[in-house]
Amino acid sequence: MTESPIGVFDSGIGGLSVLQALQAELPHEHFVYWADSGHAPYGEKSDVFVRQRSLAIARHLVEQHRIKALVVACNTATAAAIHELRVQYPRLPLIGVEPALKPAVALSQTRRIGVIGTRGTLGSDKFHRLLSSLQGQAEFVVQPCNGLALAIEESTHTAVSAQSSEKISALLRNYTGQMGTFGSAAGQMDTLVLGCTHYVFAQNELQSLLGPGVQLVSTGEPVARQTRRLLEAAGQLRQGPSPLAASARLTLMSNGELSGLQAAASRWLQLPHSACHKADPRV
Ligand code: DGL
């Protein structure tokens, strides 16, 4: 199994932000990435739908690509499906993502922390359990951002990108405006948790909107470190004399517009278009 790839999936291109961190942490590994763009966004769909998609993708990656580990690079899918995935694949190292509230508590000086994510993630029992476990340690201002993941997803299509970057800015202004005041003074939110992997690709816009004093917290790096730990523990870490070239170790698939994935992979991971393929439409 050591030579097998690691599977990574998301509702679309958001999980590429996690893949970036995985690549950096695990330079000898092969990855297969599934962008479920034909069914994005997940965040405003039912739990049952997201769970079915997650199980179908996992089955495909296990059976067709013989993956040795699975990274669910999507907060919404983790909230809806990680439990069921663990039941169905008890021996497969499985890594999910959740909004990084604990790291945010460690970073915040003002003890007021903003959290943005999809409606599915922030409305889930899993998220509510996480929030209650930190009760008393900080005040959390939680804001679901309907439409934001989709706008980021659409921003990869060159034809609509100018329009969608205006849309992204308008959504960010609107949602962060509703949350209250950001800044480093007492009573202000000095930390914002990006509870959706798509939002990482809007972090420059967010940082200029909120100012340099506000810390943005995402999950790519801790998830990559956890993946390494689980592979080590399972004795399945791939070692090699020198790191593999990115294009040789990454296979990306999408069941949406291939040009969207190609544009995102080239912009954020500097990958050639040839790394991206049409996903099996039967999944
Ligand atoms: N990127 C996903 C997440 O982390 C889902 C976004 C969506 O499809 O709504 O939640």
Image (cartoon, grey):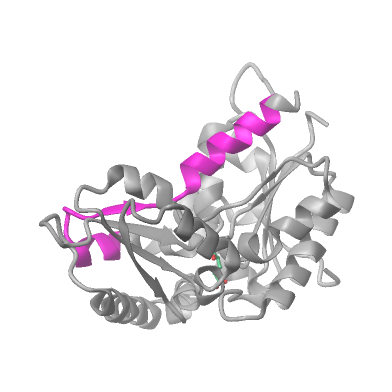
Image location (x, y in percent) of residue 111:
25, 53
Image location (x, y in percent) of residue 82:
70, 57
x 58%, y 39%: residue: 246
Does residue 226 belong to the magenta stretch?
yes
Compared with residue 236, is residue 103 higher up or lower down, i.e. above or below? below
Compared with residue 39, is residue 2 higher up or lower down, i.e. above or below? above
Foreground residue among 165 and 57: 57
Compared with residue 211, is residue 179 higher up or lower down, i.e. above or below? below
Q: Quadrant of the N terminus?
A: top right
**Quarter for ligand 1?**
bottom right
Using the rendered view, name the quadrant where residue 233 is placed. Answer: top right
x 66%, y 66%: residue: 80
Image location (x, y in percent) of residue 56:
81, 65
Foreground residue among 278 and 31: 31
Do we see residue 14 in this rendering? Answer: no
User: Bounds of the magenta span?
Assistant: 204-232
